[in-house]
Amino acid sequence: MKLYGAPMPAPNPRRVRIFLAEKGVDMPETPVNLFTREHKSAEFRAKNSLGQIPTLELDSGETISETVAICRYLEELHPDPAMFGRTALERAQVDMWIRRVEFVLMAPVGAYWRHFHPRTAALLTQYKDYGESNVEVYANAQRWLDRELERGPFIAGDFFSMADICALSTVDFATWIGLPIDPEKANLTAWHARVSARPSAAA
């Protein structure tokens, strides 16, 4: 298998690296240069028609894209430790939280990055007012997640899961583009320190 990705601060390839580190699976990443737009080349689009990373290419030539799909496939091959839950209820809860993280937390970060940040200005027509409006949306998302983290040490309960990986990569990328964690959000701040201390967070 060959895993195509890119180094920090790209959040999505990092999700897969953290997942692999938690599993103890050694799978070197084949770097794709985002700055030269290698991911938009015809050669790479043959692997992923959307021209996005990460992409996992199997020995058969089949490819899997989207971080959660890649990690679900790898979970089937390497089931322990279970990163998507150990029971039917836990698996449903992890899925629920992944979706919430992507829609509630990641969506405003992505909108701010695309429509307000100077690094993306040359890539699309930016709607600055819309982009800037997502600062408040992300602040509200932090407030919501801070309240939710009152019930346990991790996003989906008492165990580290794919939901935490998705949230960590999002929060760290948000900080990198200028949307830091509000230090008054004590639960969120403590969660971030807790998951960042895991060896896999360095992946």
Image: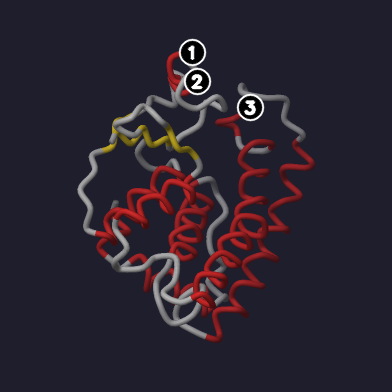
Foreground tag (1 vs 3) = 1
Q: Nearer the viewer, residue 107 or 17?
A: 17
Q: Which mark is residue 45?
A: 2
Q: Does 176 sit left or right of 76 as displayed?
A: right
Q: Amino acid at mark 2?
A: Arg
Relative depth, front residue between 152 and 176 = 152
Q: Are marks 1 and 2 in contact (CB under 8 Å)?
A: yes
Q: Name the residue located 69 percent from the left edge and 54 percent from the top edge.
A: 135
Q: State the quadrant of the N terminus.
A: top left
Q: Compared to 23, does 157 lie above or below?
A: below
The residue lying toward the viewer, choosing from 109 and 100, is 100
Q: Is residue 65 above or below residue 180?
A: above
Residue visible at 27% across and 56% down in the picture = 21
Q: Left of 33 or right of it: where is 2?
A: left
Picture coordinates of residue 147, whole percent (x, y): 62, 80
- Residue named by callout 1: 42
Q: Secondary structure at mark 3?
A: loop
Question: Which residue is located at x 47 percent, y 19 percent?
Answer: 46
Q: CA distance from mark 3 to mark 2?
A: 23 Å
- On the picture, is 198 further left or further right than 72? left
